[in-house]
Image (spheres, rainbow, N blue to C red):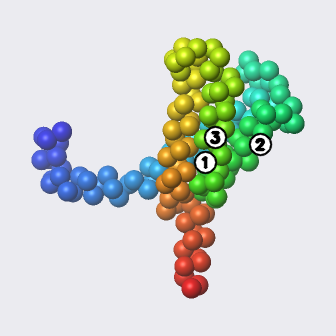
Amino acid sequence: MIIATKKMGSLPTAKRAVSDWSEQAYLVLRIGVAFLFVFHAPQKYFGLWSSPAFPLLSLRGLAILIELIGSPLLALGLFTRVVAALAAVEMVGAYWVVHRQLGALPIANRGELACLYFLVFLYISFRGGGRYSLDWLITRSHESHE
């Protein structure tokens, strides 16, 4: 690490390079998580990929709607904080309803993905949409008109 830093220049230069790309990296994270999350909706509704089908008028139906509507909103960065908070709450529910009864630890009850999604959605709910989001554009538009 120190050798690489000397070749690249000073440490502040390396930090600045990482900082310059942080918003783009966050965009990739937001879109990637949304892309992966949306597949859980058809899995539950149609019973795909070794999952039973669930009706829309059920607790899992609510999860289907959060995944189906929330994923594109997260990818676009629209209502990001609210959508991510709802998705985080859904992951707590998923862990409680589905995984908890299979064992005490996430590794034992196959709840790692629900836990990981929870942590990512919690982070997104606190961070917001970021610079490359519709939330950012709307906020900037409102600020310029004041």
**Which type of secondary structure does the marked residue at label 2 adopt?**
helix
**Circle 2 or circle 3, nearest the eye:** 3
Dot 1, crowdedness within 10 Å: few (<14), some or many (≥20)?
A: many
What separation in Å lies between label 2 and label 1 (alpha carbons)? 13 Å
- Between circles 1 and 3, the one closer to the viewer is 3
**Amino acid on which disc 2 is placed:** Leu
Residue 11 in the image: state x and y as whole percent.
17, 52
Q: Are marks 1 and 3 in contact (CB under 8 Å)?
A: no
Q: Nearer the viewer, residue 81 or 77?
A: 81
The three-letter code of the residue at mark 1 reads Ala
Give the quadrant of residue 61: top right
Which badge, 1 or 3, is on the more N-terminal residue?
A: 1
What residue lies at 54% left-to-right and 79% top-to-bottom? 143
* Residue 53 drawn at (x, y percent): 82, 25
In this view of the protein, can residue 28 be seen by the observer? no
Could you tell me which residue is drawn at 62 percent across and 21 percent down?
100
Q: How far apart, in angstroms, are the residues tagged by discs 1 and 3?
A: 9 Å
In this orientation, does residue 67 appear?
yes
Seen at 52% across and 41% down, the residue is: 120
Q: Which mark is residue 52?
A: none
Q: CA distance from mark 2 to mark 3?
A: 13 Å
Q: Residues within 10 Å of mark 3 (few under 14, many from 20)?
A: some
Dot 1 falls on a residue whose secondary structure is helix
Mark before the other along the chain sequence, 2 or 3: 2
Q: Which residue is mark 2?
A: 65
Amino acid tagged 3? Val
Q: Secondary structure at mark 3?
A: helix
Residue 113 percent coordinates (x, y)? 56, 28
Relative to 23, 7 lies left or right: left
Q: Which residue does the numbered mark 3 point to in the structure image?
A: 89
- The circle drawn on residue 84 is 1
- CB under 8 Å between discs 2 and 1: no
